[in-house]
Image: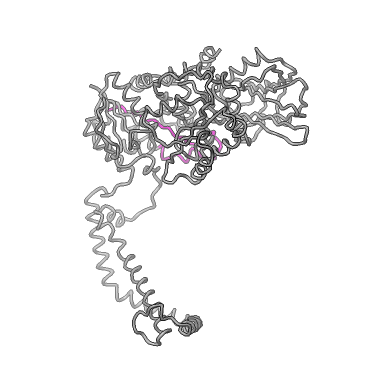
Amino acid sequence: MAKLVLIDPSLRDSGGHYYEYAIRVLSSADRAGFETVLATHRDFPSGKIRPWRELPIFRHSFWTHYQAPQPAPPRSLLDRGIDRLPWPLSRIRSAPRYLHQLVRVHFRFSRLNLAVMVAIDGRPCGVVPLSRLTLSSARRLLALYRWSRRAARLAAPALNRVRQAAAVAAALAAAPAALAIGAVLAGLAVVGLVRGRPAVANDGGSFGADLTTLGRDVAIARGDHVFLPTSHIVELEGIVAACQRVPAMAAATWHVLFRHDLFKGPPGTCPGELEAHRPLRNALRRAACLADLRVYTDTELLTDQYDALGVLPFRTFPIPSAALPDRPAAAGRKPLVVAYLGDAREEKGFQHLPRLVADLHDEYLAVGRVRFTIQSNFNVPGGEPACALAKTRLQDFDPAAVKLIDGPFPPAAYGALLNATDILLLPYDPGRYFARSSGIFVEAMGQGIPAVIPGGTWMAYAVQDSSQACLARLIERRATQVAAERVDTLAGLVRPRPPAASHAALVLAMDRAAPLPRGSLVELGCGEALAGGCETQVTVRTLAAAPRLIAVFRLRPDTAQLRFSATLAARDQAIVSDGCELIFLNWPEDPPLGAAVAVFGPEPGGFAGAVREVVDHYPAYRRSAAELAVDWRSVHCPDRMVEQLVGGVAETACRHTPAPERSRRLG
């Protein structure tokens, strides 16, 4: 029977998203008829009866020990030989340094004791307790200190000559001993080189050694599939080392998934960014030459980044979503539950939650319209500084309105928390999550839960088509057009607000714009000059991946003038397009400005404004999220993922469901 071996050295316990990911894949593989094996960290608790075999074998985890290899400084043959010796002998090189430090410390303390003894008694008589230090003795000590400073300055030239002469004499006297020590070290180096590999390997070597042990225990061979759901350079080097030691492992099919971005933000924002990933490119080449290697990412944006390496074609995998029970009806539920789920981490925006709660307190919390459920366990001991401070501030609010919970949770408890959530908060850092996926977001979309997310992230890109289609239908069916004009560029465009206009819409035809770099991040902005003289700014961040981009802005009643812009976020460069339209609209009612998710921009108050948007229009967001969940669950399905994993489906079949089909379902 063919085997499917899932390797995740970061699994230390049976909780958290990565464990749920593993059991979903293994359960689907077990139903498909594979012999399933889960290889984890050595701390993973085993012993429960499960359909798959569990092997806690790996010494290090991806998060705590593995690091990208750095170029090592050149080392002599002597150093390399000593490094290969067992631990006590490999530290012999440090013995002279330790002896020197010991002598220096002893000399310093001896000289201090002598000075104190002379100051107090005038003669050396052993260590004198400090209680005998009288005022006169202190004066004598201060005078001695001043005299010693003057004497040291006067005697410095002579002392330097004496020190140099003493150093030469000591070197001549120690020459035989130095030659003897050198001969011993050289002999030990030769012994170390003969012994072979180092006794203490680095993290990459550790992973390769553990992978070799796993391959021998499980008998990985031709026809088997080995899946690494979180990988980087260390894993690739470990695959090379294991396949060299056990040639039968090279005949298996290795599936390696990369989940972390190569670039912080859109490609092209950092000069020389591809050259910085030369070690990864070389590791991919070595692994591809030795083993049957297939490489994946879990977002289309990541696939674009890794394809730029030019080594292997990457494919986009679905993210296996949980098969949770259907959510209870939210009709008449009060208050709405607004939740933050996941570790309290700065890259996930936990530090922004106290400000959000304070902004919404009087209008929503105090009157019972919403309440917060916030997971607040730290990912590191004590928490990151900003998150630790944010948790302290959150504890000052009424526990009935702001409930803090600690995880991680087992799958059943986590599913219950997710099903009890009405609005999910995901204020992730757009720079770090420009291309990275979010498992919590995938599960929320599969359950039909509206979410609040930042613009310019993969999450916003994944629902961009449905949101754009929803806005287009709203404008076409329910709005009255007050005024419209076509312009080539929005740079410096200022217009007075028509009296009857309640909303303004920007429509940017990207297929008729000047060529933009792939994955470009576009900012559509609307600044309002109010009658009182102040100005507000609202920005919509989106990726230039659709043929047409639409942004709708609510206008305040006291708006006097409007300033519009369409720029590339990374370059602050105006976008020129002959299909740019500015439309002023009138809606008799206040419509929702999105579908399934509310996307906020970088302007102050954008996070709180997006939460207000979903709360005020919750039935519409809930309805569109439920419609999107039908397609979402069909795409991010564990059974489909295993089928693609072992069947070698073409790249186009691994992409998201085409936008027209999603739009038809939402319509």
Q: Residue at x 59, y 17 (%)?
A: 470
| Residue 209 drawn at (x, y percent) | 27, 40
Q: Residue at x 24, y 29 (%)?
A: 220
| Residue 206 drawn at (x, y percent) | 30, 43
**150 over 370 or under it: above or below:** below
172 lies left or right of 478: left
- Count up the numbered dots: 0
| Residue 441 drawn at (x, y percent) | 47, 27
Tell me the quarter of the picture where residue 378 sits: top left
Q: Is residue 154 visible?
A: no
Q: Residue furthest bottom?
A: 122
| Residue 627 drawn at (x, y percent) | 51, 16
Instruction: Say if the magenta span includes residue 52.
Output: no
Tell me the quarter of the picture where residue 523 sits: top right
Coloring scheme used: one colour
Q: Is residue 398 visible?
A: yes
Q: Which residues are magenta?
A: 252-281
Q: Residue at x 46, y 30 (%)?
A: 438
Q: Quadrant of the N terminus?
A: top left
